[in-house]
Image (tube, grey):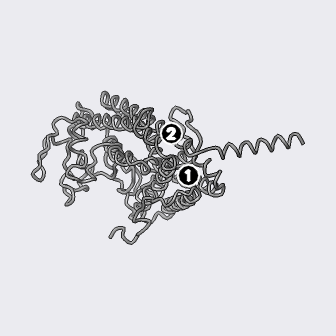
Amino acid sequence: MKRLFSLTILVLLAATARAAVDARQVADTYVNIGAAVYQDSVIAAQNLGRAVDALLAEPNQANLMAARAAWRAARVPYQQSEAFRFGNPEVDDWEGKVNAWPLDEGLIDYVAESYGDENDENPFYAANVIANPRLRIGGREVDATRIAPALLAETLNEIDGVESNVARGYHAIEFLLWGQDLNGTGPGAGNRPASDFNSKHCTGGNCERRGAYLRAATDLLISDLSAMADEWAQGGAIRKRILAGDPTDTLRAILTGIGSLSYGELAGERIKLGLMLHDPEEEHDCFSDNTHWSHYYDVVGMRNLYEGHYRRIDGSLVSGPSLSDLVKARDAASDETLRERLAASLARAQHIVDRAEAGESYDQLLAGGNRVGNALILALVEALVEQTRALERVVSALDLGSLQFEGSDSLDAPQKVGS
């Protein structure tokens, strides 16, 4: 009888602890995870910077492979930050500085003949800044004699108002480290040689300028990520705004961030669209064939924010009272359903990772006629859509009113795709 009484007390205490979680505690956990994930993104980008320095000092295959590995590692914390984007206008406005895609890579460097040398919508489509210190296009003159972060940020990025003129961020660096992936939906990623950075035994021409561009892009990425990390750190503007505001607005921000990434951005623009078109150019990490991991860590990031924990790159855990705790106290069934849907999405993403790591990359999986690969990708889309439906039930359970998640024609109006 005494044992049964003790167990009953423990159950009641646990239930009381769950009920005691309030929205302000959830907001504290949210900003703490934000601070950690952006700080980790900076640390990983700094590691990439050191690997780039080593490559440019000794441009050999081993150092090129090490720089590529550092780029992949840098994507891990950053992708987990993407669930913050749509719930915070400051992050959404900034995001294009670091993660804009797809890009017209001919703006930056040499490309294959099949790329073409002009595009009606983009005068700078094949400008090749690395090969051309001075450009005159459409009556506009660009002095690119000195390649530095300011040139990329203030002149080249989105030059002429064209979004695909991406001169900075992860994907510009990715292109410089891998080069074009000319394999279509066949096996293989980009295969830029290390000698493209070797001024003494140069391939591709302009090796010193290519190295200068790579270093400038990496320095700019570190600077951009550091600026966002500062916003979430103690005393940072975003942190202050969230903690001083209505905590119910933070709940809305968390759910908007997860829902918009889950539905319109990831399920729609990054996955379903490419699958409908069977187009490897719609692959998120199209030069490196790293897309499977980018999608996987996006899902991990969404789960992190709902469940209130983040595993840092040093192995330490940041955790606290979570949105899940709050929902569980209000509507345990809705909480359980969303947890199950998040787990299902992660499992579907893991299936794609397993396939890619076994040798069949994401661009092969989306090829027309690859029934098994297409089914794997579509299964992830369907899981993300179901996850979003579960999020909507959580919004209702918390009486948060109507939240608007980002959409995508590929999901909402598929007849418009390709027309």
Residue 197 relative to residue 318: left or right: left
At x 53%, y 39%, the residue is 28
Instruction: Provide the residue designation for mark 1.
Output: 346
113, above or below 155, in the image: below
At x 57%, y 38%, the residue is 319
Q: At which x and y percent is residue 89?
A: 38, 48
The amino acid on which the numbered mark 1 sits, given as a three-letter code, is Leu
Q: At which x and y percent is residue 284?
A: 39, 52
Residue closer to the observer: 196 or 346: 346
288, above or below 374, in the image: above
Helix, strand or loop at mark 2: helix
Instruction: Provide the residue designation for mark 2.
Output: 33
Residue 52 in view here: yes
Q: At which x and y percent is residue 255?
A: 50, 53
Q: Quadrant of the N terminus?
A: top right
Q: Quadrant of residue 369?
A: bottom left
Residue 299 relative to residue 44: left or right: right
Q: Quadrant of the C terminus?
A: bottom left
Is the residue marked by circle 2 packed among few (<14), some (14-19), or many (20+) residues within 10 Å?
Answer: many
At x 43%, y 41%, the residue is 241
Badge number at residue 194: none
